[in-house]
Image (cartoon, coloured by chain):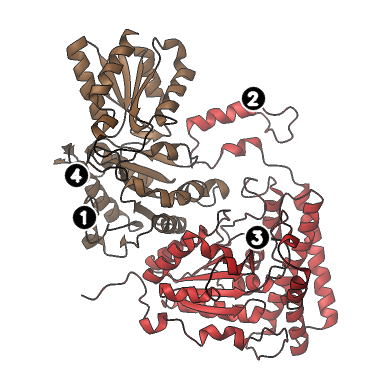
Amino acid sequence: MMEMNMVQAINAGLHQEMGADPDVVVLGEDVGRVGGVFRVTQGLHDAFGEQRVIDTPLNESGILGTAIGMALYGLKPIPEIQFADFIYPGFDQLVSEAAKYRYRSGGEYSVPMVVRTPFGGGIKGGLYHSQSPEALFIHTAGLKVVCPSNPYDAKGLLRASLQDPDPVLFFEPKRVYRAVKMEVPEHAYEVPLSKAAVVREGSDVTVVAWGAMLYEALAAAEQVRGDDGLDVEVIDPRTLWPLDLDTVLESVRKTGRLVIVHEAPRACGFGAELVSLVCENAFVHLEAPPQRVTGFDTPFPYALEDDYLPLAHRIAPALRETARF
Amino acid sequence: MPRARHLAAVPANQRATDEQERSWLRRRSPSGQSGEHPSPISHALKLRLYRGMLLSRRLDERLMALQRQGRVGFHVGHRGEEAAIIGAAAALREQDWLVPCYREFGALLMRGAPLCTYLDQMFGNAADTGHGRQMPDHFHSRAQRCLSVSAPIGTQIPHAVGLAYAARLKGRDDVALVFFGDGATSSNDFHAALNFAGVWGAPVVLACRNNGYAISLPSSQQTASKGFACKAAAYGVRGVEVDGNDVLAVYEATRDAREAAARGEGPTLLELVTYRLDAHSSSDDPRAYRSDEEVAAAAAREPIGRFKAHLLACGALSEAEDAQLQEAVDAEVRAALEAARAREKPALDTLFEDVYAETPWHLTLAAREAAQTARGGSAHTPEGSAD
């Protein structure tokens, strides 16, 4: 075991997977010699060469489109989109091509690729380096959406995503990249897809949060335990879609209360789907209306990002309100 | 250390557009005269090309008629473009890849796909390997190494570049041939793909069927450049203009491009200059944007009559053999159409398959709901699927 941050854990995972399988290739802008703007792919170019660690021309649709071709041929490409905010020029390749290839070919073709991309705010990235577009891809049938919140899960989920025969969007919370360190096994291991983690057990309120907001939810849970004696259960879905709904429902049946925290804007965010699913499946167990603490329905701001993000100071009141309803 | 290249290095002197290669139009006279150039192509291959073109033409005629009768939902034909499509497809080897646009069913058939594979897709019936999920003429076939047709324009071009890159990375000499229309050269993905192909030296043949129109817009409203082959130069790719109504010229140009790609000499952009005699699709009326005189003039240069004259002149075919061949093609089309029309619709539960490799819980629930609420008497409700 070694203590690692998320950048190191994903890097170690990439080294391991590329070493084990010659069909795994990495491609994207600046992923080669420089090792990525966040250094997640550092050292891969030296270890595996320029044919498998490919510095591409600057074109997201080209990166994703050629990665689809590689996957159709039988490689396992891992395209990197430098920031999730830059995914839109390649959006059509993801939603119209990667997502639909298996379906439209009756299963004759599939696109087993893992699109890695840093997402989320909290690093003074402003409008174009902070977005959380996960809902767009959850809404697209045929894609899987994964979002690790810690180094251990990141390495294990990356391996599971690579083993998966379908296209996976792998959202890496860049605020967590170097902020969280933990023991990570050196050997290869999988954290299974579509399996949520109960990160903190509790009996009064269920909170569902992912990525960097998980830590805000945990901080708020500590705050209301001290101030109000509330016992909060915190769930990290880890894979957003297909969702491990059972773990969420089991918790809500126990607590009767639900708060969802996400960075993305509220309207049509993944929180809305979670509320719907819980109402459809556990309505009689609810003792309060589910609440969402989210980014606002504005573009992401620069100077006021701490006011935009659903940080602990906004989550704690929602926990109290839900508990007292 | 010199700036390394990914795959096949393409020497600078070979990457520049070469005047000789650009002169296909001049070498292959577009006058409509046939037999004007000696060809090393065997009679057997010529007859194979001719049969492929006849089959395509007959299918176009029958499918358009069936669409008008409401028996086929949609059809995008390639009447007038047979030479561009059949000639290019015939130049591929078995291990090569075909990445179609949506007009190239003739290429799929030339690669050995059974006629029923194509027609089952046209009817979206239970035997369609796409389970009736796509509109007609959105075919695919893994057995023929033919990718799947997508409706957004130009999106398949980067796929071909990725396929080609992957083949070379695996140490194989497979080549990918991708078709697209002149309209697709305006798409982002055309430029992305050309650029990636050039930088990587990927073994890909990019075949632009310049048929004169993108639905209603003439080529002059897609580009201000003189044709499309010249665009290759900006990406360090060979550009070759070909008389796309001369099936032998298309065959030879594609074969040369394929051989160059297989030798590690990188990509070629072929501009196959042809004309779309019919509407864009069964939903289009071209009288709104072009004159009858223009179409009549183009029809005089259409590729099948021209090639037939060549075959008669060089002794590969007699009028009697031609009549026999036409009758055989007609019978084949008739029989296959009858069989495809008779098949049932896909079963309801196929709606939920192949979204993912394994069906997740939310789709299992959806499948159950669909079965329970299936339309009364629906012929395609799977037996025993309702609780």
Task: Give the residue number, with chain letter if any, for mark 3.
Answer: B215
User: Which residue is located at x 38 percent, y 58 percent?
Assistant: A59
Q: Chain of mark 1?
A: A
Towards the viewer: B152 or A265: A265
- Image location of residue B377, percent across then percent down: 75, 29
Label 2's element?
helix
Task: Indicate the secondary structure of the residue bearing disc 1.
Answer: loop
The amino acid on which the numbered mark 1 sits, given as a three-letter code, is Gln
* Chain identifier, brown in the render: A
Dot placed on the residue nearer the N-terminal end, 1 or 4: 1
Decide: is A291 above or below B322. Answer: above
Q: Which residue is mark 1?
A: A42
Mark 3 and mark 2 lie on one chain; the one further toward the N terminus is 3
Q: Nearer the viewer, mark 4 or mark 3?
A: 3
Displayed quadrant of residue B325:
bottom right
Q: Which chain is red?
A: B
Q: Are marks 2 and 4 on the same chain?
A: no
Residue A207 visible, this orientation: yes
Instruction: State how far apart marks 2 and 4 are (Cα).
Output: 50 Å
The amino acid type, in three-letter code, at marker 3 is Ile
* Residue at 39% in and 9% down: A287
